Amino acid sequence: MHLPELHFIGKVHSDIHNTKDAPKFHAESDRTGTLEIYPQYQDGLKGIAVGQTIVVLCWFHQADRNALQVYPRGDKSKGLRGVFATRSPMRPNPIAISELKVLAVDGCRIEVSGLDILHGTPIVDIKNIPS
Ligand SMILES: C[S@@+](CC[C@H](N)C(=O)[O-])C[C@H]1O[C@@H](n2cnc3c(N)ncnc32)[C@H](O)[C@@H]1O
């Protein structure tokens, strides 16, 4: 099947510069940062409000795309598990899903908390959580 091209809509600005320093999961993180959305996509942000939680899909550009099995959270005592049975960043298509709280919206910039995402990570999509 023909693979459609992905167009990144923006990138993450955070103070998380390496995986060792990164929270393991968004629900365990209080780290804040900014989603910079490129100007051609700004119209798509209408309706995003302070206080809501958004689902942010990122392309984990530094992930190992060859691994098919991992030790969840690096814990060898639990044994190997297939990547599709985990939330590991390692996977053939390194798409991550983080639920982030909106702290402020200013034009093309969304300040968020809950980051488990490295600085410079490309953003693929943003969705709301239906109420
Ligand atoms: C376990 S993943 C979970 C990501 C997302 N919340 C999910 O469930 O899909 C979070 C880890 O991915 C790693 N990570 C974050 N940004 C990355 C990037 N751009 N490339 C590779 N690994 C990254 C960090 O080590 C972080 O602790």
Image (spheres, grey):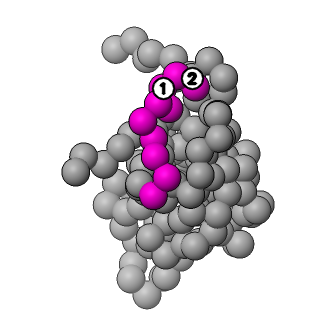
Query: Badge 1, how many Cα within 10 Å: few under 14, some, many 20+?
Result: few
- Whether the residue carrying mark 2 lies under 8 Å from ligand 1 is answered with no
In the image, which residues are magenta? Answer: 42-51
Q: Nearer the viewer, residue 83 or 14?
A: 14
Q: From the viewer's perspective, tell me whether residue 37 is left or right of residue 48.
A: right
Q: From the viewer's perspective, tell me whether residue 44 is left or right of residue 129.
A: right
Q: Residue at x 34, y 14 (%)?
A: 1
How many circles with numbers are drawn on the protein? 2
Classify 75 as above or below 48: below
* Residue 44: in magenta span: yes
Q: Is residue 98 visible?
A: no
Three-letter amino acid code at disc 1? Gly
Q: Which residue is mark 1?
A: 44
Three-letter amino acid code at disc 2? Tyr
Q: Residue at x 48, y 82 (%)?
A: 76
> Are discs 1 and 2 less than 8 Å apart at CB?
yes
Q: Which residue is mark 2?
A: 41
| Quarter residue 82 falls in | bottom left
Query: Badge 2, how many Cα within 10 Å: few under 14, some, many 20+?
Result: few
Q: Nearer the viewer, residue 36 or 22?
A: 36
Q: In what element is the residue under mark 1?
A: helix
Q: Is residue 25 visible?
A: yes
Q: CA distance from mark 1 to mark 2?
A: 6 Å
Classify 27 as above or below 40: below
Q: From the viewer's perspective, tell me whether residue 128 is left or right of residue 16.
A: left
Residue 84 location in percent, x, y? 34, 54
* Residue 112: in magenta span: no
